C-alpha cells in the first residue's frame, strides 16, 4: 500500500499536484494536510469526487499532522509568498520557520518518510530541511530544477515545432539566477542539439533566458504556477513509487558528488528510485558547465549563511 501526503494540500501547488497524481493512478492513498480546515476539506471532496473516473485512490484530509503517519513520501509546498514590501532574505527567514516546524512534526509522526521540499527558494529550504531532518541526503531532497527542466524542454519544442516528449535537456545548479543549462548533453529524438546544423546557439540562449523568467511571468499573468509544477512533482513521485531509477535534476546535498560537499543543496543529475536519492550520474560536462555549477554552489552557500 502506497501513501503520498501533501503539506499545504489546500494551496495552488498542492492541489495541482494532487490532481495530476490522481490522473496517474499510482498510489493507494493521497493525504492532504493544511492549517486551513475548510479549504483542505473542500479540496478533499472535490478531488475525491473525481476518482470514479480517474483512479482507485483513497483521498483523506486533516489539519492534524498525525495524517502524515504511514506516508511513503511527504511533499512540502507549504510556505509564505513574498509581500510587496518584503525583502528576499526576510521571506526566506519566514519560510525557514515553516520548514523547521514541519520537519519537527514529520520527525515525530513519520521519521522514515521521504521528504520532497517544493517551497521556494527551494535549494536553501531543502538544505534547511536536511539540517533539521537528521542530515539524510537520501531521504530529504527538493524539487530543484525539475520544474525548470519541464519548462525548458517545452520551450525548445515550441520554438522548433518539435514533439516536446522527445526533447531531452537538464538545468543544473540553483533554482534561480545561477541556473546552468547543460547544452553539451541536450538532444532531440536521440540526436545532440550541437550536432544539428539548423539549431543555432543564439536561439537556444534566448530560450534559456525565457525559461529563467518563466516563473515570474506566470506569477505576473495569473498569480502563481500550478499545472506545470504539479506535473514536475509527479515526475519525481512516480520515479520513487515505481522505482524507476530515473535521472532527474532534483536538489540535494551531494556529499562529494561533482566535488561539492555537505554545505549546500543544489541540482545535479540525480538517480531517483524507491529509496529517494540513490546516487548521481557521472557525466563529463564542459568546463563552462562545471564552472557554472561550482558558482551556483557558492551563491547558495552565501545565501544560507546570511540567514542561518
Image (cartoon, rainbow, N blue to C red):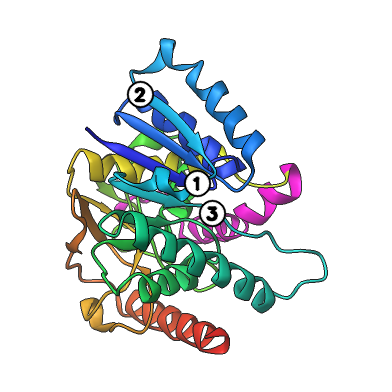
| C-beta proximity under 8 Å, tags 3 and 1 | no
Any part of residue 243 in sight? yes
Residue 166, position as x, y percentages in the image = 33, 37
User: Relative to residue 39, is residue 184 depicted above or below?
Assistant: below
Q: Are marks 1 and 2 in contact (CB under 8 Å)?
A: no
* 110 relative to 123 in the view: left or right: left
**Label 1 Cα crowd, 10 Å radius (few <14 / some 14-19 / many 20+):** few
Q: Is residue 35 magenta?
A: no
- Disc number placed over residue 57 in the picture, else none: 2
In x, y percent, where is residue 65?
Answer: 46, 50
Q: Which SS class for mark 2?
A: loop
Considering depth in this image, is 5 or 145 the residue closer to the camera? 5
As drawn, the residue found furthest toward the right would be 85
Looking at the image, is mark 2 or mark 3 nearer the viewer? 2
Specify which label sits upstream in the sequence, 3 or 1. Answer: 1
The secondary structure type at the circle numbered 1 is loop
Q: Which mark is residue 207?
A: 3
CA–CA distance between discs 2 and 3?
A: 38 Å
For disc 1, the marked residue is 64
Q: Nearer the viewer, residue 281 or 23?
A: 23
Tag 3's secondary structure? helix
- Seen in the image, is 258 located left or right of residue 37? left
Whether residue 198 is in magenta: the answer is yes
- Magenta range is 195-222
Q: Earlier in the sequence, mark 2 or mark 3?
A: 2
Give percent across and percent down for residue 40. 59, 36
> In which quadrant of the rendered view does residue 264 lie?
bottom left
Amino acid at each position: 500500500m502506497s501513501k503520498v501526503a501533501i503539506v499545504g494540500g489546500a494551496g495552488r501547488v498542492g492541489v495541482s499536484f494532487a490532481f495530476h497524481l490522481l490522473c496517474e493512478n499510482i498510489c493507494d492513498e493521497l493525504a492532504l494536510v493544511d492549517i486551513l480546515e475548510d479549504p483542505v476539506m473542500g479540496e478533499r471532496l472535490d478531488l475525491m469526487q473525481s476518482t470514479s473516473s480517474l483512479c482507485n485512490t483513497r483521498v483523506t484530509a486533516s489539519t492534524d499532522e498525525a495524517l502524515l503517519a504511514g506516508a511513503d513520501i511527504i511533499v512540502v509546498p507549504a510556505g509564505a509568498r513574498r509581500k510587496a514590501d518584503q525583502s528576499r532574505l526576510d521571506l526566506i527567514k519566514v519560510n525557514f520557520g515553516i520548514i523547521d516546524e514541519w520537519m519537527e512534526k514529520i520527525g515525530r509522526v513519520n521519521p522514515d518518510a521521504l521528504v520532497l521540499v517544493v517551497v521556494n527558494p527551494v535549494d536553501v529550504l531543502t538544505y534547511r530541511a536536511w539540517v533539521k531532518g537528521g542530515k539524510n541526503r537520501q531521504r530529504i531532497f527538493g524539487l530543484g530544477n525539475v520544474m525548470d527542466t519541464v519548462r525548458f524542454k517545452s520551450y525548445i519544442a515550441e520554438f522548433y515545432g518539435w514533439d516536446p516528449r522527445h526533447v531531452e535537456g537538464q538545468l543544473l545548479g540553483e533554482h534561480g539566477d545561477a541556473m546552468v543549462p547543460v547544452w553539451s548533453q541536450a538532444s532531440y529524438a536521440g540526436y545532440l542539439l550541437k550536432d544539428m546544423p539548423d539549431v543555432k546557439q543564439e536561439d537556444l540562449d534566448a530560450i534559456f533566458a525565457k525559461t529563467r523568467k518563466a516563473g515570474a511571468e506566470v506569477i505576473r499573468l495569473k498569480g502563481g504556477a500550478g499545472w506545470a509544477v504539479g506535473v514536475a512533482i509527479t515526475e519525481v513521485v512516480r520515479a520513487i513509487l515505481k522505482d524507476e531509477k530515473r535521472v532527474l535534476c532534483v536538489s540535494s546535498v551531494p556529499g562529494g558528488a561533482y566535488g561539492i560537499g555537505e554545505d549546500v543543496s543544489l541540482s545535479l543529475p540525480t538517480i531517483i528510485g524507491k529509496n529517494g536519492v540513490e546516487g548521481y550520474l557521472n557525466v563529463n560536462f564542459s568546463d563552462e558547465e562545471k564552472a557554472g555549477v561550482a558558482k551556483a554552489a557558492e551563491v547558495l552557500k552565501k545565501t544560507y549563511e546570511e540567514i542561518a
